[in-house]
Image (cartoon, helix red, strand yellow):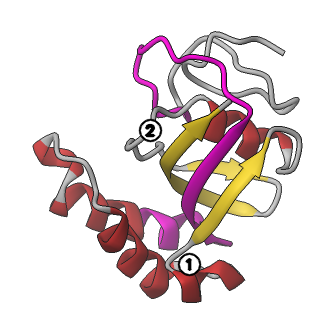
Amino acid sequence: MGKKGKGKSGVDGGDKDGDKAGGAKGKQLKTCNHVKARHILCEKQGKLMEAYKELCDGWLDNGDRVPPGKFGEVAMKYSECSSAKRGGDLGWFPRGKMEGVFQGVAFSTAEGDVSQPFKGANGWHVLLVEGRKA
């Protein structure tokens, strides 16, 4: 597994160069073993894009960070995951717990950043990384 922590994630969960799915946007991230994140999961790309547009219109297009509580409100409105009732909160999870693409994006997104929408094994996602630790 690569440790560059930038850009698009491969299906194996390793970090690859590029920046389609990751939220690091060229930043060099320190390697971490645990991430705290919230996410929005939708079966259909169109529904997820509605949620992402709401995040863009409210914060991202202005260069602002999305407050976790506001991300949570959008997750409760759009997400089809059981975590939606908790505002999409997944809590802390270690490397190796999540499926490959999701893990790759989570571990290559900087703290406080929202990922680009991406397709994982369970559907379409967008995530907010709230914390990173060794």
Q: In the image, which disc is placed on residue 45?
A: none
- Residue type pointed to by label 1: Ser
Residue 30: say if magenta.
yes
Residue at 50% in and 23% down: 19
Mark 1 neighbour class, 10 Å CA radius: few under 14, some 14 to 19, many 20 or more: many
Q: Position of residue 126 (x, y in %)?
A: 52, 55
Q: Mark 1 = which residue?
A: 79
Q: Is residue 104 left or right of residue 27?
A: right
Q: Position of residue 89 (x, y in %)?
A: 57, 70
Q: Depth-wise, is mark 2 or mark 1 nearer the camera? A: 2
Q: Is residue 119 left or right of residue 94?
A: left
Residue 59: say if magenta.
no
Residue at 43% in and 86% down: 77
Q: Quadrant of residue 41?
A: bottom right
Magenta highlight range:
21-49
Element type where label 2 sits in the image: loop
Seen as rendered, the residue at the extreme left is 62
Tell me which numbered mark, 2 or 1, is placed earlier along the sequence: 1
Question: Vertical placement of 102 versus 82: above or below?
Answer: above
Q: Is residue 94 left or right of residue 119?
A: right
- Residue type pointed to by label 2: Glu
Q: Is residue 87 left or right of residue 35?
A: left
Seen as rendered, the residue at the extreme front is 134
Q: Mark 2 = which residue?
A: 111
Give the position of the C terminus as an image quadrant: top right
